[in-house]
Image (cartoon, rainbow, N blue to C red):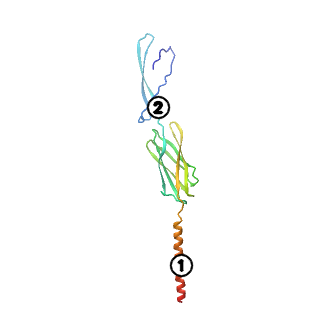
Amino acid sequence: YYIPELDPGEDTVLNLTFETDTNVPLGLVPILITVDYRGADLAPSRQVATIGIPIVGSAEMGVASIRTEPARIIAGDTVDLTIRLENTGTADADSIRATVDGLTFTGSKEAFLGTIEPGNDGPAIFSLEADEAGEFDYTLVIRYTDGYGEHTVRQALHLVVAGRSPVPAIAVAVVVLIVAAAVAIYWYRRREEE
């Protein structure tokens, strides 16, 4: 930067822009500033100063993986939906709260994770009752804070719930009918023998 002239008592502001590496440690980083100038007698002078630049990272939250227990959801099941949230940013994500919006199922639809450091992940676990079969679109809303304030991330997701198969119920009914018929035949033959 070049300043042509400063009168006695006058000052000026310089806007300096820095770009940091993602591996720079967070906190106050010292920067060396050198000012070369000429005084009233035109003799060259140099002043060296150190200023501190605060380096503040930002957190970035996203979905790392989704898992359900049971793996294949059938209508009527109690489902544990585990969504792992990952911090891909350069600062801690604090006060993380995940909410499931758009699912009509009953159960816990909010999870609190606390803090996730950069490069780490954590589970948001939701327990839901899969009341009906079908394909359901829903939104995962992630709220968190970092050095820049509060943030909200919305992620569109999809859940498939299969309908109950009538085969087991039919098989049970057939077995009951066969047993009832066998008992009836046995009872009838025994009665005829008497």
How crowded is the residue under tag 2: few (<14 C-alpha within 10 Å), some, or many (20+)?
Answer: few
Q: Which residue lies furthest to the top in this view?
A: 41
Q: Residue 181 carries which label?
A: 1
- Disc 1 element: helix
- The image quadrant that residue 177 belongs to is bottom right
Provide the residue designation for mark 2: 54
The quadrant of the image that shows the C terminus is: bottom right
Q: At 53% from the left edge and 78% from the top edge, which residue is drawn? A: 181
How far across and how far down the image is residue 165, in percent? 53, 63
Camera-side mark, 1 or 2? 1
Q: Give how far apart the Cα atoms at labels 1 and 2 are.
A: 85 Å
Q: At 54% from the left edge and 71% from the top edge, which residue is drawn? A: 173
How crowded is the residue under tag 1: few (<14 C-alpha within 10 Å), some, or many (20+)?
Answer: few
72 or 67: nearer the viewer = 72
- Disc 2 element: strand
Q: Which residue lies furthest to the right in this view?
A: 104
